[in-house]
Amino acid sequence: MGAVADAALAAGGEVIGVIPQALVEREVAHQGLADLRIVGSMHERKQLMADLSDGFIALPGGIGTFEELFEVWTWTQLGSHAKPCALLNVQGSTIDCCPSLTMSSTSSSSSRFTAR
């Protein structure tokens, strides 16, 4: 995510970082952010990111990336929010790591994932 933050900053964009204290201690938090919010847990991180976001796009990543996307997607299904959720398929990476899912857009403000 550091590369995405760097690119957004270089393009003049606003970047808000949200990281749990435990990861600050284990990793180097991005020092170039004007707004870096340190929270107590991963759950607090996901909640704050959801509160700050207009929508959710998951880039290629690991199991944690999918866990975070599936949680906000579940919140959509439960009616907790109506924000769009999407997987960004970079050079087939999403299809390779999650072949049972495809994404189809609906006319509403949310996206739905469907089994192939």
Image: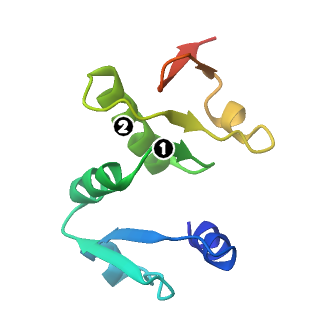
Q: Say which residue appears at 40% left-offset and 51% top-offset.
A: 53
Mark 2 is surrounded, within 10 Å at the Cα level, by few (under 14), some (14 to 19) or many (20 or more) other residues, namely many
Q: Which mark is residue 69?
A: none
Above or below 62: residue 89:
above
Mark 1 secondary-structure assignment: strand
Q: Say which residue appears at 65% left-offset and 41% top-offset.
A: 88
Quadrant (top left/top right/bottom left/bottom right) for the C terminus: top right
Above or below 107: residue 26:
below
Which circle's residue, 2 or 1, is located before the other in the chain?
Answer: 1
Place residue 75 in its image quadrant. top left
Q: CA distance from mark 2 to mark 1?
A: 8 Å
Left or right of 47 on screen, residue 76: right
Left or right of 12 on screen, residue 81: left
Amino acid type assigned to the residue bearing label 2 in the image: Val
- Residue 106 drawn at (x, y percent): 56, 16
- Residue 26 drawn at (x, y percent): 37, 80
Asked whether 78 or 52 is in front, the reply is: 52
Left or right of 112 on screen, residue 99: right
Residue that badge 2 annotates: 72
Amino acid type assigned to the residue bearing label 1 in the image: Phe
Place residue 28 in its image quadrant. bottom left
- Residue 109 drawn at (x, y percent): 48, 26
Residue that badge 1 annotates: 56
Asked whether 116 or 57 is in front, the reply is: 57
Mark 1 is surrounded, within 10 Å at the Cα level, by few (under 14), some (14 to 19) or many (20 or more) other residues, namely some
Left or right of 34 on screen, residue 60: right
- Residue 24 drawn at (x, y percent): 34, 80
Q: Residue furthest right?
A: 91
Q: Residue furthest top?
A: 116
